[in-house]
Amino acid sequence: MGRLDHKVCLITGGARGQGEEEVRLFQKQGAIVWLCDVLDDLGQPLADELGVQYRHLDVTDEAAWQNLVEEIVRTSGGIHGLVNNAAIFRVGRLKTTSVEDFQAVMRVNTLGVFLGMKTVAEPMTESGGGSIVNISSMAGLRASVGSFAYGASKWAVTGMSKTAAVELARKGIRVNSVHPGLIETPMVEDVPINKEGIIRRTPLGRIAQAEEVARMALFLTSDESSYSTGSEFIIDGGLNAL
Ligand SMILES: NC(=O)c1ccc[n+]([C@@H]2O[C@H](COP(=O)([O-])OP(=O)(O)OC[C@H]3O[C@@H](n4cnc5c(N)ncnc54)[C@H](O)[C@@H]3O)[C@@H](O)[C@H]2O)c1
């Protein structure tokens, strides 16, 4: 028996990185998975490999969200899980972040999460309830020196998750945020960060693999986390404990 049997789940930014691992794990655990991304060249072959559904979705597009969620409900009979995973990263301190970069990051990372929650709230209620997992970051719990806009966007995700959790609790919908430290994915491949320094400071002495975040998303989407809502779930190898 799978941990997500019969649950219809949508994962944004599912074509690579953590999203891809979530797609793989959710499918393995019995979910009916829909994945979406703007990277069609990666998303479609992944969906074909696993026998799941891929759709192009730019998470900043409200009409596209509505069309996709309607199609999911029509085709799969409901929606029970949403992982708001899609995001972008930009380098820049307070003084060096341009308005364009700030707005671009806020649109994908914050507006995208807002639209996702707003769009699924009613159909998820009508499906008997469900779970929304918003991928924030340690940058959504602490200072984010050198990635100012990203930090702002991820704090917004942390805050929106709490308010949505309270507003949606009596509709049978749980909302939690996930806060990864440094994870080995394409997002951080070319970013000028001192990975060795982070590894030295991290109590567990390494950075994480995408699957370790996917396992948290699985737990929070499954009924195993039935009494958790409005909470932050940290995956950082112990850094936050220092
Ligand atoms: N990698 C890390 O160290 C780290 C740390 C903390 C939090 N996170 C968060 O984890 C999540 C996953 O990131 P990742 O590390 O797998 O990065 P990634 O860049 O590999 O994956 C992000 C995915 O989001 C997609 N995406 C970007 N803009 C989009 C849009 N407008 N609409 C739809 N999809 C879009 C990308 O195409 C990509 O597939 C993100 O929310 C990220 O902020 C990552």
Image (spheres, grey):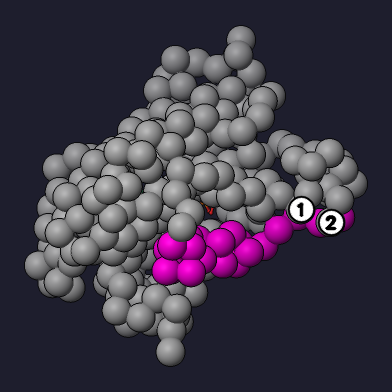
Q: Is residue 77 magenta?
A: no
Q: Are marks 1 and 2 in contact (CB under 8 Å)?
A: yes
Q: Residue at x 87, y 43 (%)?
A: 201
Q: Which residues are magenta?
A: 205-226
Is residue 23 in sight in this rendering? Answer: no
Q: Which residue occupies the extreme top position in the image? A: 95
Residue type (three-letter) at the residue carrying disc 1: Gly
Q: Residue at x 37, y 52 (%)?
A: 174
Give the position of the C terminus as an image quadrant.
top right
Q: CA distance from mark 1 to mark 2?
A: 5 Å
Is residue 100 positioned above or below 78 on the image? above
Q: Main secondary structure of the magenta part?
A: helix
Q: Residues within 10 Å of mark 2 (few under 14, many from 20)?
A: few
Q: Secondary structure at mark 2?
A: loop
Q: Secondary structure at mark 1?
A: loop
Q: Which residue is mark 1?
A: 237
The percent coordinates of residue 131 (x first, y second) are 36, 57
Q: Residue at x 14, y 42 (%)?
A: 63
Q: Which residue is mark 2?
A: 204
Q: Residues within 10 Å of mark 1 (few under 14, many from 20)?
A: some
Q: Mark number for residue 180? A: none
Q: Is residue 208 left or right of residue 115?
A: right
Is residue 8 positioned above or below 16 on the image? below
Residue type (three-letter) at the residue carrying disc 2: Leu
Q: Is residue 162 left or right of residue 17?
A: left
The percent coordinates of residue 240 (x first, y second) are 75, 40
The percent coordinates of residue 228 (x first, y second) are 48, 54
Viewer-closest of 218 and 227: 227
The percent coordinates of residue 68 (x first, y second) are 18, 56
Q: Is residue 223 magenta?
A: yes
